Image (spheres, grey):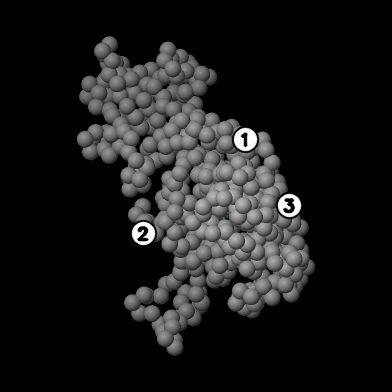
């Protein structure tokens, strides 16, 4: 007798097999004919497996008739063709009950809790159809990320989570320290970090980019994929304090190569989700965003639009839209501007590039015009920015000048400068937020609902 998953048992090919299936009951329905229908789920698929439990089972009266939502069971039986809307069902020969759940006390007994309410029950929400589906899609996207880069010959680099460089200015950082906050060692009125664990201030990383560049500048094509942290106090539906980022970095790539890589990469993630998570995607289309599948299909079929920042600004200026933040050349585009461009103007994913140098970090390559840098952001409808990246500055003299502009000391980045000193190469890379990708694919509105345990200001219960 084989132990198989609900997903396997739901397939026609399983008919006739003697099997063991294990999981949690979703519902029980007693038939007048003296038997019960159980709906079993084990996380392997959205759909449940129908179990027929006959009164002849030795524990039918004592246990089976008490099974309800969340009860856990092992079932031995035969897979049969079903006359119902599902292809198969299992006729139980034995039902072992591991744990019952009191229907009066079980919070998910009553159907249809709001997503907000479910966030308070992060330990129970994986039991809902929605979070099962999100979890399977998130898994699929993670697998595709590795498959894509591995197939293209990239090396997976594990960049550190604790870092001493407050690089980038990508966002506010979390401090990592073993100093006792009640007895901080002071020197000239300031905390003396030389007495701290690393002998200097240390933080949780905001990006693995600078470390990835080190490897790209010797091994060619690399990517890092791991957690990143931003201590911004932004309570939006698209920001988390802890999120996962995948960052490819490629030697000898320029900005055009970088844009092409980003487009190919996103399309691969979208098409894998559509082909490998068919049942879950239909669920999202039915319950959350009826356009999600058609949007992804259209995006896969078309080329992304490329638009320089300067042109984007003039489109916005001529749009006649009332924006909360007025638009003029040199401003950091806000999400309202980004969404206007991708949703209303282009009605397509759009890659904005060549941003004003004053807006962007020191490591982005300066264009010949002196005013702009080779930065790019990929914008998609509903989510806005999904990818941010650039061609990196490979010229040491320009790099040190840019550091000066941004009040950074080249000595603090001596190792980063060394990459330009010894065999410098043009190179480029970008960062994709995993949760923004999953949000976009599923059509879930809030980023807190596409990560198992969201970390946001004031919230880290589980
Ligand atoms: P935004 O302008 O949306 O705050 P950013 O420009 O600060 O993002 P980058 O530093 O360019 O973000 O990071 C690269 C990618 O990481 C973004 O395009 C986005 O997909 C993702 N990302 C950035 N910040 C967050 C966050 N706080 N929560 C979730 N994902 C994020
Ligand atoms: Mn960005």
- Mark 2 Cα shell of 10 Å, populated few (<14), some (14-19), many (≥20): few
Percent coordinates x, y for residue 125 in the rendering: 37, 41
Residues 193 and 119: in front is: 119
Question: Counting residues from the N terminus, which is met first, the one under dot 2 or under dot 1?
Answer: 1
- Residue 354 located left or right of residue 163: right
Q: Quadrant of residue 74?
A: top left
Question: Which circle, 2 or 1, is nearer the viewer?
Answer: 1
Circles 2, 1 touching at the beta carbon (< 8 Å): no
Q: How many marks?
A: 3
- Mark 1 Cα shell of 10 Å, populated few (<14), some (14-19), many (≥20): few
Circles 1, 3 touching at the beta carbon (< 8 Å): no
Residue that badge 2 annotates: 458
Q: Quadrant of the N terminus?
A: top left
- Residue 355 located left or right of residue 43: right
Disc 2 versus disc 1: distance between alpha carbons?
39 Å
The answer to whether 25 is drawn above or below residue 174 in the figure is above
Residues 393 and 132: in front is: 393
Residue that badge 1 annotates: 298
Circles 2, 3 touching at the beta carbon (< 8 Å): no
Question: Counting residues from the N terminus, which is met first, the one under dot 1 or under dot 3?
Answer: 3
- Please identify the residue farthest to the bottom as the structure is shown: 188
| Residue 359 appears in view | yes
Q: Quadrant of residue 104?
A: top left
Q: Secondary structure at mark 3?
A: helix
Q: Residue at x 44, y 23 (%)?
A: 19
Residue that badge 3 annotates: 257
- Please identify the residue farthest to the right as the structure is shown: 423
Disc 1 versus disc 3: distance between alpha carbons?
23 Å
């Amino acid at each position: 007798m084989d132990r198989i998953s609900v997903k396997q048992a739901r397939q026609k090919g399983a008919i006739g097999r003697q099997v063991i299936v294990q999981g949690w009951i979703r519902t029980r329905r007693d038939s007048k004919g003296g038997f019960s229908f159980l709906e079993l789920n084990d996380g392997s698929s959205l759909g449940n497996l129908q179990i027929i439990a006959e009164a002849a089972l030795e524990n039918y009266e004592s246990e089976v008739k008490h099974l309800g939502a969340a009860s856990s069971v092992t079932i031995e039986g035969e897979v049969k063709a079903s006359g119902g809307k599902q292809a198969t069902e299992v006729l139980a020969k034995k039902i072992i009950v591991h744990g019952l759940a009191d229907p009066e006390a079980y919070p998910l007994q009553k159907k249809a809790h709001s997503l907000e309410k479910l966030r308070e029950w992060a330990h129970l929400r994986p039991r809902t159809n929605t979070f099962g589906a999100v979890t399977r899609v998130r898994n699929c996207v993670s697998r595709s990320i590795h498959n894509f880069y591995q197939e293209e010959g990239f090396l997976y680099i594990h960049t550190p989570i604790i870092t001493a460089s407050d690089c980038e200015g990508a966002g506010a950082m979390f401090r990592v320290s073993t100093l006792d906050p009640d007895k901080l060692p002071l020197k000239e009125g300031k905390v003396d970090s030389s007495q701290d664990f690393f002998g200097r201030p240390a933080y949780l990383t905001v990006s693995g980019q600078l470390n990835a560049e080190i490897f790209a500048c010797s091994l060619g094509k690399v990517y890092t994929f791991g957690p990143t942290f931003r201590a911004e106090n932004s309570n939006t539906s698209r920001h988390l304090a802890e999120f996962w980022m995948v960052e490819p970095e490629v030697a000898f790539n320029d900005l055009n190569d970088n844009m092409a890589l980003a487009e190919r990469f996103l399309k691969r993630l979208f098409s894998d989700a559509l082909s490998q998570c068919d049942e879950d995607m239909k669920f999202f289309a039915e319950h959350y965003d009826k356009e999600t599948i058609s949007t992804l299909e259209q995006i896969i079929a078309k080329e992304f639009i490329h638009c320089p920042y300067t042109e984007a600004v003039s489109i916005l200026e001529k749009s006649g839209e009332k924006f909360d933040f007025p638009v003029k050349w040199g401003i950091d585009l806000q999400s309202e501007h980004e969404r206007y461009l991708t949703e209303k103007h282009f009605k397509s994913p759009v890659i904005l590039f060549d941003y004003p140098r004053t807006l962007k970090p020191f490591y982005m390559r300066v264009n010949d015009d002196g005013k702009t840098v080779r930065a790019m952001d990929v914008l998609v409808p509903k989510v806005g920015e999904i990818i941010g990246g650039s061609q990196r500055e490979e010229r040491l003299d320009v790099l040190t000048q840019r550091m000066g502009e941004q009040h950074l000391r080249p000595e603090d980045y001596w190792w980063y400068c060394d990459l330009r000193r010894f065999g410098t190469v043009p190179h480029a890379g970008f960062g994709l937020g995993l949760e923004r990708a999953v949000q976009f694919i599923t059509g879930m509105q809030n980023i807190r609902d596409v990560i198992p345990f969201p970390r946001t200001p004031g919230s880290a219960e589980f």
